Amino acid sequence: MKRFYKEASSAPSEGGHGVLLDGRPVRTPARALLIAPTAALAQAIAGEWQAQGETIDPASMPLMRMVATAIDRIPPNRAAVEADLMAFASADLLCYRATAPSNLVERQSRHWQPVLDWAALRLDAALLVTQELMQIEQPPQALAALQRRLEALDALELVAVHTVTVSTASLLLGLAVLEGELDARAAFEAGQTDELYGLEVWGEDEQARARLDTLAGEIAAAERLLFLMRQP
């Protein structure tokens, strides 16, 4: 779609802060008003619109996309989103360790074990770890604790956690970013430990690197969303 406006801005609106294009409010794909909870987040979304060239590229507006998702898709589908996240928890990446080579084993432990320890201590979710290929059954009480944590999230927080979780195959990493236990870079390196190790061993691959860059960008955008929604 070609750019159809000159100026993007933000302004207080009922329920939060809206984004305006030449004074007209931005709406979500489902035609709801795009309302951010903070001025900082609305200003950042307006910045995404203002940065567009002659053609609008939705992929370059992750904040807009995540807020629209929280408005349009979470309320009617929240149970399904939570179920999707709990499926990741039941087979969390951090719980499945390599047996060799030794430097990969060490790297997985260095990136993953602190997050598992944090989840056990802070979330009351002590997940089991295995070196077997078959999926193991996680303790029901640990999964119940994770479910309760998801139920306590608002829609934007849930979108951010879902973004990180899908990008890393780990709900624990998604929650660690939410809680500030890990920054985006650390979460990316933990989630892509095996892939980054493979590039080091076998050499760079253009397609693999492009995919990793995309995932890193998604995680960074989720972290920024969380930061902005906690500002004035």
Image (cartoon, rainbow, N blue to C red):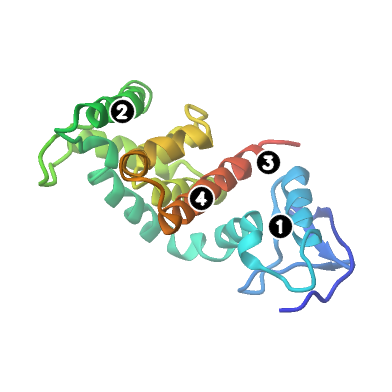
Q: Earlier in the sequence, mark 3 or mark 4?
A: 4
- Would you place residue 52 above or below residue 93 in this image? below
Mark 2 to mark 3: distance in Å? 32 Å
Q: Are marks 1 and 2 in contact (CB under 8 Å)?
A: no
Mark nearer the viewer, 2 or 3 = 2
- Name which residue lies at 71% across and 66% down: 33
Question: In terms of depth relative to the viewer, which is nearer, 119 or 147?
Answer: 119
Mark 1 to mark 2: distance in Å? 42 Å
How many neighbours does mark 2 have within 10 angstroms: few (below 14), some (14-19), or many (20 or more)? Answer: some
- Which residue carries the number 2 mark? 107
In the rendered structure, find residue 213 and report the number of the disc placed on it.
4
Can residue 49 be seen? Answer: yes
- Name which residue lies at 33% across and 20% down: 121
Mark 2 to mark 4: distance in Å? 20 Å
Mark 3 to mark 4: distance in Å? 22 Å
Q: Are marks 3 and 4 in contact (CB under 8 Å)?
A: no
How many neighbours does mark 4 have within 10 angstroms: few (below 14), some (14-19), or many (20 or more)? Answer: few
- Which residue carries the number 3 mark? 228
Residue 125 at x, y percent in the picture: 29, 30
- Relative side of 206 to 53, left or right: left
Q: Earlier in the sequence, mark 2 or mark 3?
A: 2
Mark nearer the viewer, 3 or 1 = 3
- Relative side of 157 to 81, left or right: right
Can residue 148 be seen? Answer: no
Q: Earlier in the sequence, mark 3 or mark 1?
A: 1
